[in-house]
Amino acid sequence: MSSVLKRTGRQRQRYEGNMRLVSGCIPYRWRKDNTDQMGEAEEILEVLMVSSPKRDDLVFPKGGWEDDETVLEAACREALEEAGVKGILREIPLGKWEFRSKSSQDDLCGMEEGCRGYMFALEVTEELETWPEQKNRARQWLCVKEAFRLSRYDWMCNALEEFMRVMEEVEEERKLETQDKNVEAEDVSECQSKSPKCYKRSSTMQYHGMLQHASQEIAIHFGY
């Protein structure tokens, strides 16, 4: 049994007018794939989705934003409760979306109200073996292309599109960091040849080459 208790009820639920405020995230990880001819492992971007109770579809972890927590805390809590994951949350939201229930079984927005949801990107660092909603939700890691295919609602596809844009920015930042480290290593190596007090520091990092392909898939999905 999970030692983390799930929050229940709507006593502390935040509203704006008749819109219920919701916070959630797109959990992601970099999974090492096959080793190439150079002996380096390729990194594949995957996102985590969870099953919906009483419905045959997959969603991203999300739930009501309550009045005793920040929107960031709410997103992390929902990731823990629904998917059993912890990680590093990017504080800048992917965006804000409004949606209404299309099913009487929806546990977020009633038929008489809508939801205003804030979504974030969460880099997963820990997967728990047990979590509060484990009996009602199964989690599944998917490549981005498959996540697009299985997303039931337009707002989920829009959030994924923004998520990929952010990941492209992250990739560019990583490439710049790698270049800086390589230049630094070259400088230290040259210094080492001139002085015994200097030492060589090396750091080798390889990143995936799938973001451009995924962006093309997004363009096809949205008809760009």
Image (cartoon, rainbow, N blue to C red):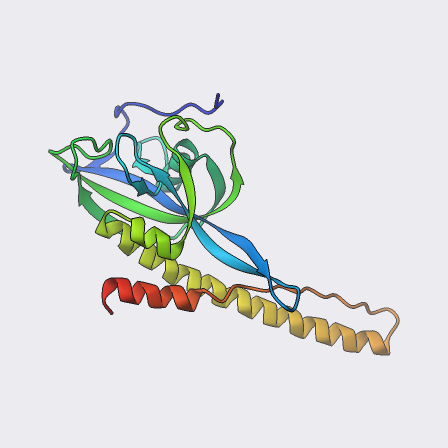
Answer with the quarter of the image where residue 219 lies. Answer: bottom left
Image location (x, y in percent) of residue 33: 55, 56
Residue 70 in view in this figure: no
Instruction: Tell me what residue is drawn at x 41 percent, y 38 percent.
Output: 139
Instruction: Tell me what residue is drawn at x 43 percent, y 34 percent.
Output: 80
Answer with the quarter of the image where residue 195 lies. Answer: bottom right
Q: Does residue 82 appear to the left or right of 127 in the view shown?
A: left
Q: Is residue 178 above or below residue 105?
A: below
Image location (x, y in percent) of residue 31: 53, 52
Give the quadrant of the C terminus: bottom left
List the single residue furthest toward the left: 112
Q: Does residue 158 appear to the left or right of 83 in the view shown?
A: left
Q: Does residue 174 appear to the left or right of 99 in the view shown?
A: right
Instruction: Tell me what residue is drawn at x 60 percent, y 72 percent.
Output: 179
Front in this rendered view, residue 3 or 177: 3
Residue 210 in view in this figure: yes
Image location (x, y in percent) of residue 119: 33, 47
Answer with the quarter of the image where residue 16 lies. Answer: top left
Front in this rendered view, residue 167 or 21: 167
Image location (x, y in percent) of residue 164: 38, 60
Q: Is residue 135 above or below residue 206?
A: above
Instruction: Tell me what residue is drawn at x 24 percent, y 51 percent.
Output: 155
Q: How many marks?
A: 0
